[in-house]
């Protein structure tokens, strides 16, 4: 699974409503990504979440409409 650093739109819609059920992964201080998925919910500790988000330590799966990086282009 490919992941990327989360952004505001991953957890709130254009009206500021929380996207309950959004999946995310956290990164530890050592830089390791926790493979246990987390789900954004009403029970999410927002203080800890905001701290990790501010430090770019929240990751989400790459989606269909995300920009992609072309690693190698195939030619015929």
Image (spheres, grey):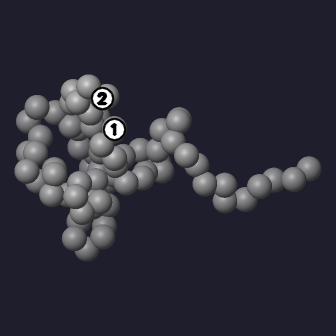
Q: Along the horizontal axis of the image, is 74 left or right of 69?
A: right
Picture residue at 25% right of the left edge, 74% below the top:
30
Work out whether 13 lies above or below 56: above
Along the horizontal axis of the image, is 15 left or right of 42? right
* Distance in Å between CA atoms under marks 2 and 1: 6 Å
Give yes or no for contact between labels 2 and 1 (Cβ–Cβ under 8 Å): yes
Q: Which mark is residue 59?
A: none
The residue tagged 1 is 9
With respect to residue 7, does 16 lie above or below? above
Q: Which of the numbered marks, if any, corresponds to residue 13?
A: 2
Task: Please rate how many residues cluster around mark 2, counting C-alpha atoms within 10 Å: few if below 14, some from 14 to 19, many from 20.
Answer: few
Q: Residue 37 appears at what percent x and percent y?
A: 28, 45
Q: Name the residue rendered at 55%, 46% in the picture.
A: 67
Is there any visible trace of residue 26 in the rendered image? no
Q: Residue at x 41, y 44 (%)?
A: 61
Whole-percent x, y for residue 59 in the image: 34, 52
Spot the residue most to the front: 15
Residue visible at 23% across and 43% down in the picture: 38
Please state which of residues 47 and 1 is positioned toward the viewer in this rendering.
47
Quarter of the figure with residue 32? bottom left
Q: Position of residue 13 (x, y in %)?
A: 30, 29
Q: Residues within 10 Å of mark 1 (few under 14, many from 20)?
A: few
Residue found farthest to the bottom: 30
Spot occupied by residue 41 in the image (x, y as percentages of width and height): 16, 33
Decide if residue 55 is in sight here. yes
């Amino acid at each position: 699974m490919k992941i990327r650093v989360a952004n505001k739109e991953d957890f709130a819609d254009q009206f500021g409503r929380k996207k309950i059920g959004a999946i995310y992964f956290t990164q530890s201080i050592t830089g390791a990504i926790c493979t246990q998925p987390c789900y954004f919910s009403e029970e999410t500790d927002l203080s800890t979440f905001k701290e990790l988000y501010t430090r770019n330590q929240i990751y989400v799966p790459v989606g269909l409409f995300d920009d992609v990086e072309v690693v190698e282009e195939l030619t015929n």
